[in-house]
């Protein structure tokens, strides 16, 4: 308990999982959906990913945003739809947004997005939470889609607040278990 609460362990771990830090630019910004609350409201991870997607789109000139994420957590509505609504309400033109709504896991995100972008020209940039980038970027590359990672500080930001370190720590423990599972299955 003392190790998590009083050291930079969470920040170090999240930094390692995120990989090299860049604000990569490109043509297509792929954003992975996260959680939703009761299927009708963005959960924290989806909200943060949507906020960073809006900033990236407005600041760095992506021609399109592809949001990937189907129903999850007992919901029947795809999380990508909720994120699309947030992006359009934040000024991203609806014509610049594409949706992938079948996937329910990071591997399925990679497979479905790869199918959608197989013949698309341009540089593809993957945006997701810092702690998720290690597994996500490798899953996309494993299915043959060349992406440039663009993590954003999710767990890293939470690590600066003593009361949020534990939730960030538990999130990264879960992510590390999922990464091990993906390695065992040959998905990364």
Image (cartoon, rainbow, N blue to C red):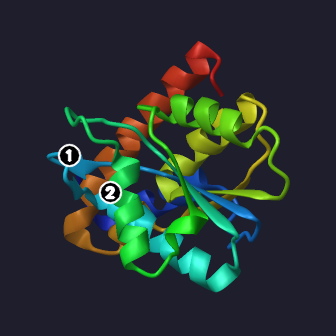
Which quarter of the picture shows residue 137?
top right
Q: CA distance from mark 2 to mark 1?
A: 9 Å
Residue pictured at 34% horizontal, 48% vertical: 79
Q: Residue at x 35, y 69 (%)?
A: 86
Q: Which residue is mark 2?
A: 82
Q: Position of residue 69 (x, y in %)?
A: 44, 42
Q: Secondary structure at mark 1?
A: loop
Residue 160, given in percent of the width and then of the height, sits at 35, 74
Q: Is residue 104 or residue 17 the one in the foreground?
A: 104
For numbered disc 2, what is the local secondary structure?
helix
The quadrant where residue 15 appears: bottom right
Density class for disc 1 (Cα within 10 Å; few <14, some 14-19, many ≥20) is some
Tell me which label, 2 or 1, sits earlier in the chain: 1
Which residue occupies 67% across, 39% down?
116
Left or right of residue 40, residue 187 in this image: right
Which residue bears the numbered disc 1?
39
Which residue extends farthest bottom? Answer: 59
Give the side of residue 150 with respect to residue 8, left or right: right
In this orientation, which residue lies closer to the viewer: 53 or 130? Answer: 53
75 lies left or right of 107? left
Residue 180 in sight? yes
Is residue 8 in sight in this rendering? no
């Amino acid at each position: 308990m003392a190790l998590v609460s009083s050291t930079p362990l969470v920040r170090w771990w999240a930094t390692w999982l995120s990989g090299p830090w860049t604000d990569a630019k490109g043509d297509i910004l792929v954003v992975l959906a996260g959680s939703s609350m009761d299927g009708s409201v963005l959960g924290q991870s989806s909200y943060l990913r949507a906020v960073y997607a809006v900033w990236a789109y407005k600041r760095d000139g992506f021609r399109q945003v592809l949001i990937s994420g189907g129903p999850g957590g007992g919901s029947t509505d795809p999380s990508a739809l909720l994120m699309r609504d947030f992006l359009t309400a934040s000024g991203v033109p609806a014509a610049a947004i594409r949706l992938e709504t079948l996937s329910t896991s990071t591997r399925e995100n990679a497979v479905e997005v790869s199918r959608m972008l197989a013949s698309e020209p341009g540089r593809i940039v993957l945006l997701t939470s810092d702690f998720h980038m290690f597994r996500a970027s490798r899953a996309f590359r494993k299915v043959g889609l060349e992406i440039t990672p663009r993590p954003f500080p999710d767990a890293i930001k939470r690590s600066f607040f003593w009361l949020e370190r534990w939730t960030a720590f538990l999130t990264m423990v879960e992510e590390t278990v999922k990464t091990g599972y993906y390695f065992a299955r040959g998905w990364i």
